Image (tube, helix red, strand yellow):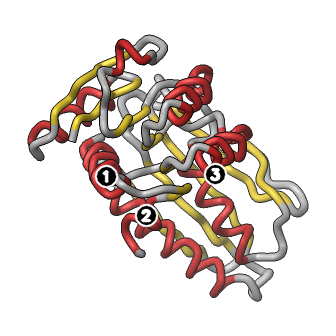
Amino acid sequence: MKIALVGYGKMGKIIGEIAESRGHEIVAKLNETPSVENLNQPDVVIEFSNPEVAFENIKFCLENSIPVVCGTTGWLERKPEIEKIATANNIAFLYGSNFSLGVNLFFALNEKLADLMKNFGEYNVQLEEIHHTHKKDAPSGTAISLAEGIIKNDKRFNGWKLDETKGNELGIFAIREDEVPGTHSIFYQSEVDEIEIKHTAFNRNGFALGAVIAAEWILGKKGNFSMKDVLFS
C-alpha cells in the first residue's frame, strides 16, 4: 500500500519503519495540515497527531475519499461527527484508543471481569493509568475505553471522573512519569482483599504494528470500525 503518515512524531516514525518492513511505501510524513498536494495520493492515511488538529485532519481526508486509521486521543467528543462524514462519503474510518494486540485482549478481559464483579458491591472499583510526561491528554484514551467497558457492564456507574471516585462515578487516576509508554491497572478493593488486572507496555512497537495491521485490514472497506473489528471479527 501507499501510506501517508499524518503526525510524524515518535509514534509516526515507528509506524513508518514497521510499514516499510512489511513492504508498504510511505508517500507522506506530515506534521502540517494535510492537503491534496502533500498527501501524494495515498491508499490510506494513518493519523497520529494531537487533539487540537485531529478532527480537521481526519475530516479533510475522508471528504477527499481517503480511508483513515486514527490513534489520536483527546478529541472524542467530535468522533460522532467524523463517523457521519465517513458514512456520507462512503469511505472507511477506524479509530483505536490503543492499537496494541495485548491491550485489545485486555479490553476484553476487563469487560469479562466487570461482568463477574457487578453483583459484589463490597468491592470498590478504580482505574489507574501511567504515561510519559509528553502525553497531552489525561486520562488516556485507553483508560477511557477501559472505564466505558466497566460502566457498560456494571450498573453502579453512570460515568467516570478524573482523579476522584465519587458516588456513581468511576474514578480514573492519571499519573505522568518520564518515558513510560503506558501502564493501565484496574483495582477491585474490599475490606479484606484486592483484585487487580494490569497491562504494561514495554515500548511503542506494539501500538505501531497494530496501526499498520489496521491499515492493511481497512483497505477496500466502507464504514466505521474499531480494533475489535480487526482482531475479533
Question: Residue extending furthest right?
Answer: 167
Residue at image mark 3: 144
Q: Amino acid at mark 2?
A: Asn
Q: Residue at x 62, y 50 (%)?
A: 87
Residue at image mark 2: 104
Q: Secondary structure at mark 3?
A: helix
Percent x, y for residue 176? 52, 32
Percent x, y for residue 100? 35, 54
Q: Secondary structure at mark 1?
A: helix
Marked residue nearer the N-terminal end (1 or 2)? 2
Q: Quadrant of the C terminus?
A: bottom left
Q: Amino acid at mark 1?
A: Gly
Q: Is residue 117 above or below residue 215?
A: below
CA distance separating discs 1 and 2: 10 Å
- Tell me, for residue 156, which label it has, or none: none
Mark 2 burial class by Cα count in 10 Å: few <14, some 14-19, many 20+: many
Q: Secondary structure at mark 2?
A: helix
Q: Amino acid at mark 3?
A: Ile
Residue at image mark 1: 210
Percent x, y for residue 91? 50, 47
Percent x, y for residue 43? 31, 38
Marked residue nearer the N-terminal end (3 or 2)? 2
